[in-house]
Image (cartoon, rainbow, N blue to C red):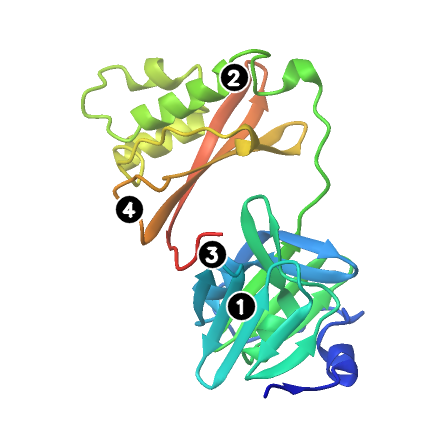
Amino acid sequence: MFKKISFTMLAAYMLILPNFSSSSFAADTPITIDSGILKNNRVLIPLRAVSENLGADVKWNQQQKTITIAKENTEMVLTINSNKVMLNQSEIVLDVPAELNYNSTYVPARFVSQTLGAEVNWNQQASQATITLDGKQLQVTIQKPQVQIPIAKKITDKLTDKQRQVFVNKLNEATDLSSIKQIRATFSPYFTDKFINEIIRSKGLKYDFKFTTVYQSAISYTNTNTAKLSQSSGPDSKYAPNETLYRTAKLVYTNKGWKVDGVDFSLVNEVFNP
């Protein structure tokens, strides 16, 4: 028999966002996560951030839509869209459940983090949660509402999305510069001078992998002059099934239109696939 406990006092302590600034911690350089979600005055963070940075073991049950997060003597089982959680075989009730957003699983930041032993602080002015555990510090920033971009400025063709596909093709081409004789002439219409200098110095992009799939949601706008083009390696890549390579291109709007200004990669162990 599972023991069902009243979670009123614990919820008040662990879930309500405090109205004070983050303290300073003696931790390494903070890891930034800019995809937090604020819902019902609670911060939700991507589950991947938990498994990567809080040292927890994460398992996904596709059939039951449950997430098991375990570390040392602590185990919690969350169910998508359910506010009931099993914590070390005791049932508790949260104000906000785990949920799917942008094809990723999001979990309550304060509950999960503090249950794993982390310290959590909320900066109201910056809309930022700081999570500290074992010398690591995560800074979770809440996503801003989607920016409205004039149609004429959007990175898309009305029918074929040609422009975003051109960026993908050129980024794929930049993985290996050995066969390109005129590097600047090849990439100047699509990359900024700053980014061209970077790939010349590094002799190409960090990962020699050519991304193919471009989802409709691949483009996100930070403001009217900056955007991101995000892609993942997919289930049939050389990294699958245990890893996924993510590529995020930083785009800026110049007097000659949109150009790539930088690229970030992340190779992630995928212990779940909701």
Q: Mark 2 points at which residue?
A: 161
- The circle on residue 62 is 3
Q: Which mark sits nearer the N-terminus, 4 or 3?
A: 3
Instruction: Write down the residue under mark 1.
Output: 137
Q: What element carries label 2?
A: loop
Residue at screen point 60% across, 86% down = 2
Q: Earlier in the sequence, mark 1 or mark 4?
A: 1
Give the amino acid type for the residue marked by disc 3 in the picture.
Answer: Gln
Disc nearest the viewer among 3 and 2: 3
Question: Which badge, 3 or 1, is on the more N-terminal residue?
Answer: 3
Point out residue 58 in the picture as x, y percentages from the top left corner.
Answer: 45, 67
Query: Can you tell which of label 1 and label 4 is closer to the viewer?
Result: 4
Residue bearing mark 4: 239
| 38 relative to 138, above or below | above
10 Å crowding of disc 2: few (<14), some (14-19), many (20+): few
Residue 180 against residue 115 in the figure, above or below: above
The CA distance from mark 4 to mark 2 is 27 Å
Sooner in the amino-acid sequence: mark 3 or mark 2: 3
Secondary structure state at the residue bearing disc 4? loop
Q: Is residue 209 visible?
A: yes
Which of the two marks, 2 or 1, is nearer to us in this view? 2
At label 1, counting other C-alpha atoms closer than 10 Å, the crowd grade (few under 14, some 14-19, many 20 or more) is many
